[in-house]
Image (cartoon, rainbow, N blue to C red):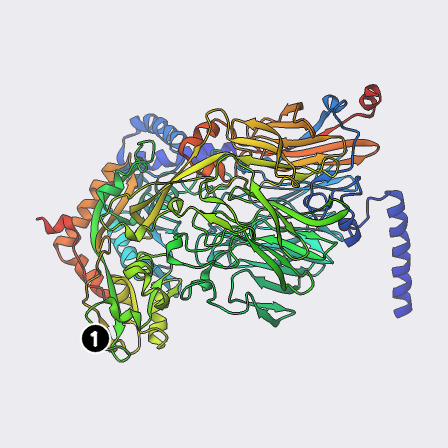
Amino acid sequence: MKDQASGLRGLALTSLVAAMTLAGAAQAKVTDQDILKDQATAQDVVSNGLGPRAQRYSPLARVNGDTVQDLRAVWAFSFGGEKQRGQESQPMVKDGVMYVTGSYSRVFAIDVNTGDELWQYDARLPENIMPCCDVINRGVALYDDLVIFGTLDAKLVALNKDTGKTVWKKKVADYKAGYSISAAPMVVKGKVITGVSGGEFGIVGKVEAYDAKTGKKVWTRPTVEGHMGYLNGKENGITGGEAGKSWPGDLWKSGGAATWLGGTYDPDTDLLFFGTGNPAPWNSHLRPGDNLYSSSRLAIDPDTGKIVWHFQTTPHDGWDYDGVNELIAFDYKDGDKTVKAAATADRNGFFYVLNRTNGDFIRGFPFVDKINWAKGLDESGRPILSEANRPGNPSESTDGKKGKTVVAAPSFLGGKNWMPMAYSQDTGYFYVPSNEWEMDIWNEPTAYKKGAAYLGAGFTIKPINEEYIGVLRAIDPKTGKEVWRYKNNAPLWGGVLATAGGLVFTGNPEGYLMAFDAKTGEMKYRFNTGSGIVGSPITWEQDGEQYLSIVSGWGGAVPLWGGEVAKRVKHLNQGGTVWTFKLPAKDEMAAR
Amino acid sequence: MKNKLILAIASAPYSIATRLMPGLLLSVALLVGLQLALINPAQARSYDDILAAGRISVAVYRDFPPYAYEVDGKATGLDVELAREIAAGLGVELDLHWMIADENLDDDLRNHVWKGHYLARIEDEPMLRREVADVMLRVPYDREFAYKVDPDGRVINDLVHFFGPYQREHWGLVYDSQRMESFENLAVFQYERVGVEIDSLPDFYLSSAFRGRLRNNVEHYSSTALALDAMAQGRVPAVMGMRSQLQWGVGGLAGSERIKTADIPFPNLTKRHWDVGMAVKDAHRQLAYRIEDVIDQLVANGQMKALFGRFGVDYSRPDRYRVQ
């Protein structure tokens, strides 16, 4: 009986192997090696950021300054239905199949050759969820034969890559307590690593690792001082050692610091890098202290979830300068010495270069034109505050009047928000999608919440310049110099891609996919996708031709806030389309 | 999809016609029905539509005792009972529309009165219809709020009609008399702890008052009800919150006789009390007038006071009924 069974299995295996051979590489599973080498292997994109360091750099050079004008749209795939709003996803491509997420926690598998849909998965969302900031999703992780993504009701879902059927599903946090997931998870050493999104109060950020094949939780690491971490179900040390060191009273219990943008991984130092959001409550006058580890970058051991080092960009944040923006590992030469660095462009308007082995501050400089909340950074990278530009304490407004207005720059949407920058290994520059805007903040005593009198803060975001808000910048991390800039009327909200073809790609809310010369900033190509672009482009090679894809669909956080910024974007139409381009081989030949 | 649309349009005028109109007007009614279906995507309905449908949907906050909550799957609470009185007063059936509170009242009005939440889209509808309620309860009644303008000078809630104040709400503070001696002012909380609902006005007030000297003794709970539970279990000796919530909560605690209300000043506390009313979409004032008639009667004949009494809450009349 037993022998017979194994004999049958042997037979099945043989025919499976035969099928695999026939179908070419179509059955290959994604391995840890595939993810680690993703940047170098141009025939697929199996990680968010084109490699675990998320440099968003591709070694492909077929599309370059000479050939980019021959880039052709080969298909456009609509997410369909009435569920549009912001599309902030980065597609993935493996063996001729694209895996991409849409708004409202949807996943699509598409045949790259034809643009045909292979399957679609719609997460069944509970009727009573209240995610804070639109219904976006930033993409999937691929591992083994699984497509893994996070949902608006804070679950991780693993789907079979061929059928779209659910293999496992895990609740990461309770949506009823205000948690959600919008970031793309990542896979490191067989574990899915995810953070959580959450509203203004009552939540505590965390980073968690799950066994990618089974969904079993391996470790959890809260990001607020005083909370216990766990490894394989056992206590694994309190974050920050103990409670109450940098928080008054019991506020650490609900300290915020959401890890809503996910993280990056540096194989060289074997560290995960996660950013953390602003502390709660929003009124900083109620919580004197640094409020660790809010608005920080954390380096975390991927095996245990221990925090190895931290760097806080905005201590005692009172401006909602989330510290979530991606920290990208890169090496540079200082004389003969190779510096193991990592860089991040913070919401607070400063660009930081850190020693990625220990979190030491190497240098920092403004990357936007106007910063007034701080006069600069000291030698340890800590901001030198301008306290006059800290939003006031609403409780001091006892006369029921609006109180004085504070102008703070950048606005709380940041010098740079979630949209990922790119690092070119050829030029050594970072390409930073940034925005020039400031905010007015005042105390609002005429406010109510859930039937009760309340003290709110009123705010409005204002452009600093008439002609533009968005600025795509090429920044030299060694000198802090801006090499070139491209000015955009609407705020930039989409990711960037750099290639060995000497090009930098990004999209704008006006709907254009654009390509710039990486050295000069000259615009070499643009194509109108029909709705605003707030997603991140990818490129890969298939059958000897270079492809490029970007998701188009206006939305995200910008249209949720009105004021003067609304005037620049209110005419933009929603959408939900993956555009795929390629450079046909014949055009590449012609260009030579 | 198309068939369904036609059916939906045809069915509503049919009931209007049978109840109120002779057959001659059927075609007119059909036309009106068609326009309503297309022009009114948000679905808040006029008084006539509500009468025609025989149903009214009333928005109340979910899990918010003593105002609206469920016991063994059955809805109850001050606002739920009031919603039942309103439906009965109009002679229609009640549909409860449960709300999850957003960050502030402006958001709740947008989500439940005039626009609908972007996730509350009605599936399989041809238009982008989102469910909203006909009327929302527990809406603070404050002229200054109602006419509040945005930085460009536009009235923020211009699509909302505020009406029908039915209760005055107050802040209050209760303490366990076996764990604390009576006290005459807030200074005692430099030494004793006090529970509050996180991100509420009592939270801001106690955390900021007297240059933050009480701050380290403020204990945060995700609701006032949980703070009261903690007090019952001896984990915190005092709680500050809305008076009607405190009265209801204390009434249900074991050893409630030990719990006393502190009659102390709250220096510099903005809005020690405020009136609570209702909201409808701006176009539906006729509905508001009819509901106001129902409320007037409940207050005048003492039913409102009795209703609050059933939940252990002292009824405090809003301004509207004090002036008379």
Question: Given the current orientation, which residue lies at the most extreme bottom position?
Answer: B178
Question: Given the current orientation, which residue lies at the most extreme left position?
Answer: B324
| Residue A188 in which image quadrant | bottom right
Residue A68 lies left or right of residue A251; in this view the side is: right
Q: Which of A285 and A228 is in front in this view?
A: A285
Q: Which residue is drawn at 57% across and 33% down?
A: A553
| Chain label for disc 1 | B
Label 1: which secondary element: loop
Q: Is residue A143 visible?
A: yes
Q: Nearer the viewer, residue B297 or A40?
A: A40
Q: Residue at x 70, y 54 (%)?
A: A187
Q: Is residue A583 above or below residue B144?
A: above
Position in image of residue A478 (x %, y %): 66, 41
Number of marks present in the image shown: 1
Position in image of residue A237 (x %, y %): 59, 70
Give the quarter of the figure containing the N terminus of chain A.
Answer: bottom right
Q: How crowded is mark 1: few (under 14 residues within 10 Å), some or many (20 or more)?
A: some
Q: Is residue A537 visible?
A: no
Residue B299 lies left or right of residue A93; in this view the side is: left
Q: Which of A257 and B282 is in front in this view?
A: A257
Position in image of residue A82 (x %, y %): 53, 36
Position in image of residue A402 (x %, y %): 28, 43
Residue highlighted by disc 1: B182
Dot 1 amino acid type? Ser
Question: Given the current orientation, which residue lies at the most extreme top position?
Answer: A590
Give the quarter of the figure containing the C terminus of chain A.
Answer: top right
